[in-house]
Amino acid sequence: MASRFDWEDDKRSAFVYIKDVNFGWIPARIAEDDSNYTSFRRSKVIAETKFEDADEVADEEAAIEAPGTVKVITQEPVAWSESTSTAKRKFEFGETVEVVLKDYKDCELPMQNVAASGLLEHQPDMSDLAFLHEAAVLYNLKERHRLGMPYTKVSEILVAMNPFRWIDGLYSKELLMAYASMIIWRDSEENMSENEKAKRESIKLRNGFFGGLEPHVFETSCKAYKGLAVDGVNQSILVSGESGAGKTETVKILMSNLANIGQNRDAEPQDLKSKSDDIVDEVLSSNFIFEAFGNAKTVRNDNSSRFSKFTQLQYDVEENMGVGVPSCKLVGSFTQTYVLEKSRVVEHSFKERNFHIFYQLIQADDEYKSLIWDGLSDSTIDSFKYVGYTNVDTIGGTHDSEKAEETVKALAEVGIVDEKLRVLMRAVCCVLQLGNIALEQDPDDADKSVITSLEELEKLSELMGIPSDSITEALTSRSVKARNEVFTVPLKKEDAIYSRDALAKGIYANIFDYLVEQVNEATRAPDIEDKSFGTISLLDIFGFEHFDVNRFEQLCINYANEKLQLKYTQDNFRVVKEEYESEGIELIDFTGVDNPEVLDLMESKLGLIVVLNEECVRPNATPNTFVKKLKRINRRLGCLVQERLAPPEEFGIKHYAADVTYDARNFIVRNKDALADDLVTCAAQSTNMVISQQSKKLIAGGKGKTFKGQQRGWLVAATVLGKFQTQLKQLMGILEKTKTRYVRCIKPNSSFTPGATDHGETLVQLKSAGLVAALAVSREYFPNRLPHDAAIQRFMPLVRPMGLLRSEAESDKSYIERILQELLKDFKIKKRGIDNRIFACGKTRVYFRGGSLEYLETERQRVFTGSSICLQSFARYVIWRCRFCAWKKSAIKVQSMVRCQKHRKAFLLKRNACISIQTAVRVMVARMEFIRLRRDRAARRIQSRWRCKTTMWDFFSMMDAAKTIQRFFRNRLAKEDLTAAMAVVVEDARHQKKIETVLGDIEKYIDQSKENNEDQDILERSAESLNFAQKQLYSLRAKSDMLRSENMVLNEKLMEQTKNATNSNMRTSALRLDSEALQRKAEKLQKLLEEEKKKNSDYKKQNKAMSLTLLEASKKINEDKEKIATQHDLELQSLKGEVEAKDAAHAKEIAELTRKFEAKLDAANNEIADLKKSIDDDYDDFTVVREALFDNAGTTRNRASITADSGELGALRDEVMQMKMEYEQNAMDQEAKFAEWKRNYKCQVCANNPNNPKPRKKKGGKDKDGCTIM
């Protein structure tokens, strides 16, 4: 309890709020020299404090009258300029201001909720504020908004400040599951596994759930889900606020959460899960559809909903068996819409836009637009008058073309694709094209109108599928029925324009209704016999509106908010009030939050709705007559403002949030919702299904019935306000059967600045939402209650130690009141509100202030805890003593093993280091030895090649000498043969001469015989025989030569074939041997491969075991390696110099050997050429001699000797040719081997050079010079 000493010591009492015209409230501090106000506050504290001792009251100071003024010093809060959006300020912080106290309630300045340091405190639940008033609520919301905490609670109401930015992590799936864990599945954690519990606790810790849940929209959705799943009660969430407050986004977040909570709870079969995912996608896609067709950019909001929406999410709820949380799966949804702003289709204010779908359709791809309608190709915003000019093509950071793609995808989710999508978009094009129809006054008759844009009319005719004459007639004339006759009345220009706009609005309303039907058809849960679905309903509705000029739409919106306020009052205040009154507990007056008189004004038999409906059907009705009639009939109602000087078309209503003055000039027109028969009939003839079906429904529904006194020829549906009243009654009937939760959205400023708050706008919205009154009431009633007998039984363990015994005549009420006073004497609450009782005892129940029951439960738990501690302590001692002994033994074993392992690792580390060093040294020595051996091997190969060459050259020299000797020897033999042949030739010549002499003698003898005619025939025959013998000899010689040449050719061919056969046999044998060798090598390689695999596996195991050891030894080894590497570098540099010097010497030696070899090869080739030439010359001489010998041969011996000599000479020639061929072949082989040796030697030098900068290639490959890599 507070005392005067508490007041004097508490410096926080000096911090107050004062009123300001621009900011509503500003913080200030009472001046130290102003003692009058301080004394007045002290006296009020003393008077309000309840003392049990009368003497103590007598000693207190008497009350002091309130002073007239008080001096305060204005204070600048933290980050004032960043968090305040109001531009102008008429004061300076730190200046002294004199405040008139009579302007404040009870002549007392409202106090700030500050800490001892003077800094402003903020609470997540404003019911916990120490000082509760309008200024405290404003600054609490402002501070949380500045700190990036947009959500605040007012008891069960969630207040959402639009942050105008996306806050990272605020809507993450992980955070949603954390709220679901804390709210929904907390009671079922006993059935969870340890892993699930640990995971859930980690989520809680990461998200900061130490002192309870922060206010969040997730909390509202999770409580609604739990209420449906566990309690089996249908739920509803009412989201309200003005345009730009974030209602649409809040509803989308709520719908997404409610759709996904149940889907992520348990694992499902794949087919069921895919089906449920499809349902979720269809339900969520409806948001994009309604956003495209029902939202528009306004001055207050870029994505303002121009209609209200009531969505019922349908769930298949499992029966609650009392174990865990029952399954609750989303199976469908049903949507209803209210008060679509159709007037926006034909007109909207400057800097505003029409509905989003028009701009999305115009900004879409030309290819897509041409598929819908050719008139859309190459169209822009300027192409359609209804759209109007705007330079805004991006909403929420997304371009209209991208939004168009999202809308098409969303429509596909509900089954509007292909031709249905084309028909829908063409209906939208009809609305756009109607705005391009230009209507002018008929030049011949001022009472008629004509369509001047004939080209636009033809486009509209093609779009709607209606003849242009029918459209012209419907827009420019009206059919009027008088008795049994129908007359056609032409329309003036203004009336024709009104008809055109009315038709456009009617078509768009038909489109919107068609979309609602399609969405419901796609998302509604299937009807199952004897099966009812649980529902969670979301209501997105306009908040209370109060403008400078309030029209018919504001009346509808405020009427709906009055109904919702009544529902809120019934849910939170009236039920509490009735219960407290029945229990005999006094409570504050609820008239500030309950305003039933306004609903009487609206809904009574002679109320506003009835009067307006009568004026709509009464001839010659005007706004003035409507207002006059309304004021006259309801003059006794105090909520109807009647000012004598008010304009005749205005009236005011005292709503629960504020007094609103309405301008009734368009009330009758807006309430009629009239559409001419001709326009409806014309629309029903359209080939577009969306337009014609909805128009036919309007005709078939009997809406063409005329009311008494109504102008005939008009289809008048139930008036807008009457229809809206019916819808609200149905809505209230649904909400009455549900547990309702409230989300109040607040728009902090009109400039969409993150973190900034406009005090004036925020205060107006707080009053409109009734939050201050709700806070006051929530602070006064007691949230917890218990029956008397239950309370006595529950708290008896706390009473027994105190000795508070109950007398026999004492009632339950007096006894529980006595023990609670004793138990709660140390429990203190902060002074807040009017009623500061900790508890209140009713007739049958005892009611507890917030926190008091928790305090008693804590004390009760403490008593039980103290009793169990003694039992638990000894049990824990025994258990932990046994565990300690076991742990000690285990620790000793572990330590010994750890030490052993540690020393073993050190030993292995050193051993491996030594092995590594030894390996490196051995590798270096082996490498040097390998280089030396390879160098020696190369030298030996060079020497062997050189010795082979020199020996070959000596052999060739000796063979040339032998050939020369043979040549000279054969030459001598040939000369001897030639001498003998010459002798034969001489002898043949001599015989020839003798024959010629004989022939001459014979001729002479013949001549003489001719003269003497003696033996002439004999002589002639002898001469002919000799000539014939000579010719026959020459013929035989020619045939012999021919046969000899053919024999030589055949011998050559036979030798060549024999040689080829020998080579083929050798190649076959070599290939066979190579194949066998390769097979043996393959087998060996296979064995080696298996051994290597086995070794590799062993090495991997060893490497894995040694990896940790090598890591520890790496530092020392690296140091040793650096030293060894330095030495290696020096040695390699010296070796490099030696190798380069030897390479140079070898290169010179190879060049010299090559030059000598080429010189000798040229000399041998010259000798072979000379020998060939000499042999050819000798053979030619021999052929001449042989022919001469054959020509002069006279005996068989000579011919035989000549033939033998010829065969011997041919054999000698063949032998020489064969030797030549072999020599050339050997020379070519030697040259090829020498070139191969040169390449091999170069490859060895390259491979053995450790400082070669080129990368090493795989052994057996080829380098760029074609050398084989060794």
Image (cartoon, helix red, strand yellow):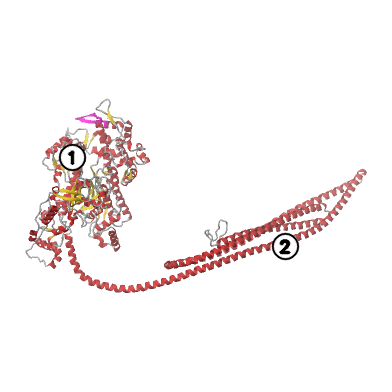
- Image spot of residue 546 (x, y percent): 20, 43
Indicate the secondary structure of the residue bearing disc 1: strand
**Does 486 appear in magenta?**
yes
Secondary structure beneath dot 2 equals helix
The x, y position of residue 399, in whole percent, is: 33, 44
Q: Which residue is mark 2?
A: 958
Residues in magenta, as a range: 474-493
Mark 1 or mark 2, earlier in chain: 1
Closest to the observer: 807 or 644? 644
Residue found at the very far left of the displayed protein: 809
Q: In the picture provided, is 303 more to the left or to the right than 806?
A: right
Q: CA distance from mark 1 to mark 2?
A: 139 Å
Q: Position of residue 837 (x, y in %)?
A: 13, 57
964 left or right, relative to 860: right
- Decide whether residue 1228 is among the magenta residues: no
What amino acid type should be assigned to the residue bearing mark 2?
A: Met
Q: Which numbered circle lies on residue 628?
A: none
User: Label 1: few (<14), some or many (≥20) within 10 Å?
Assistant: many
Pointer 1 residue: 662
**What type of secondary structure mainly makes up the magenta span?**
strand
